[in-house]
Amino acid sequence: MTILYGIKNCDTVKKARKWLDTNNVTYHFHDLRGDGLDNELLTSFVEKSDWQIMLNKRSTTYKNLPDEIKNNLTEQVLFDTVLTHPTLLKRPLLMTDNALHIGFKAEQYQELF
């Protein structure tokens, strides 16, 4: 099953959803704010990717984090902080065939589907 993880009002997520719909790709949308982000789901993301790729350091949420968190980004601190602030994850996250794809590029989605 293909699952698109994101936040419904994120412009990049909207583009990804539009591309999937236009290309008749069946998927389930999981809103990280509305549907939630828990330990199990975040663990599955971390097992399939790297924090350096998943962490959105350009986000307003990241910029507003206290310096003590930004200067101490151990894996546990990242994990706990992302659970509290799911907008720290780059979006969208697309899970296909047990692989995690981060971000949206039409060319990448074309290759996948």
Image: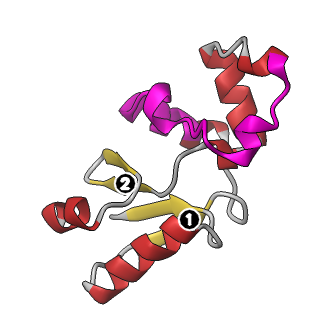
**Distance of label 1 from label 2 (alpha carbons):** 11 Å
Amino acid type of the residue that numbered disc 2 sits on in the rendered structure: Met
Q: How many marks?
A: 2
What's the residue type where badge 1 is placed?
His
Most common SS among magenta residues: helix
Q: Residues within 10 Å of mark 1 (few under 14, many from 20)?
A: some
Along the line of sight, the residue nearer the viewer: 88 or 99: 88
- Residue carrying label 1: 30
In which image quadrant can residue 28 be found? Answer: bottom left
Magenta residues, as a range?
A: 42-67
Examine the structure image and report whether residue 21 is included in the region drawn in magenta. no
* Residue for point 48% across, 31% down: 46
Residue 84: image location, x then y, percent: 78, 40
Q: What residue is shown at x 44% (from left), y 74% (from top)?
A: 15
Q: From what the image shows, is residue 76 above or below residue 7? A: above
Q: Quadrant of residue 76?
A: top right
Question: In the figure, residue 24 lies in which quadrant?
Answer: bottom left
* Nearer to us in this view, 69 or 94: 69
Q: Which residue is mark 2?
A: 95
Residue 82 drawn at (x, y percent): 68, 36
- Residue 100 image offset from top left, x and y in percent: 35, 46
Relative image position of residue 111 (x, y in whole percent) = 14, 62
Residue 19 badge: none
**Residue 29 placement, left or right of 26:** right
